Image (spheres, rainbow, N blue to C red):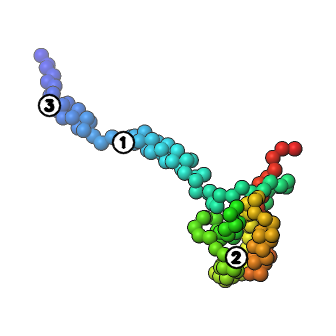
Amino acid sequence: MGMSIRSSGAKGRRQRRAANAPMSEINVTPFVDVMLVLLIIFMVAAPLLTAGVPLELPSAKGKQLQAQKSEPIIVSVASDGNIYLGDEQKETMALAALLPKLQAIAKARGGTDQPVFVRGDKVVPYGQVARVMAEIREAGFRKLSLVTQIESGG
């Protein structure tokens, strides 16, 4: 009589090794969760980063300018008459202080061929915006644009 003897010890060892073997699959669920949270955070935070100086711009017909190659210089005239240089509402400046700051920017950026965008609130008298534009021209900048809202409707 032939009898086959199975050794249960060898089988048991193999099963234990297979159960303790490292998993070769990557669980992507936590990664997807983190990415979705970051997406929501950036979607909420992005509009807050481009606020700039709060102005109520006048409306005008026309089409939007094409994107510029270089970052434009932005000069804003608020409704209270304060002048701001740049996109942020850090500090106000007098009209007399605008010329030296613009000349320093031109020297730092390598010339006066950069575009300058003038943002004037619609309640600011035209004379004050014209004086700001004259200071910009005096600093040597020739690419000067007035920023307006695109007029809605027919």
Residue 115 visible in the snapshot = no
SS label for mark 3: helix
Residue occupying image coordinates x 75% and y 63%:
124
Q: Quadrant of the N terminus?
A: top left
Measure how far apart labels 2 and 3 are at the Cα level: 93 Å
Find disc 1 in the rendering and name its residue: 24
Give residue 117's mark.
none
Image: 10 above or below 88 = above
Label 1 sits on a secondary structure element that is: loop
Rendered-image quadrant of the C terminus: top right
* Image: 86 above or below 23: below
**Residue ID for mark 3:** 9
Amino acid carrying label 1: it is Ser
Q: Is residue 135 above or below residue 88?
A: below
Give the mark, 2 or 1, whose residue is nearer the N terminus.
1
- Which amino acid, mark 3? Gly
Q: Nearer the viewer, residue 3 or 130?
A: 130
Could you tell which of marks 2 and 3 lies nearer the N-terminus? 3
Q: Amino acid at mark 2?
A: Leu
8 left or right, relative to 123:
left
Residue lying farthest right?
Answer: 154
Give residue 138's position: percent from left, percent from top. 77, 81
Lower position in the chain sequence, tag 3 or tag 1 = 3
* Rendered image quadrant of residue 33: top left
Q: Residue at x 63, y 60 (%)?
A: 52
- Residue located 83% across and 44% down the image: 153
Q: Pointer 2: what residue?
A: 95
Question: Could you give the CA–CA distance between mark 3 and mark 1, rounded to whole angstroms?
Answer: 27 Å
Do tag 2 and tag 1 residues touch (Cβ < 8 Å)?
A: no
Between circles 3 and 1, the one closer to the viewer is 1
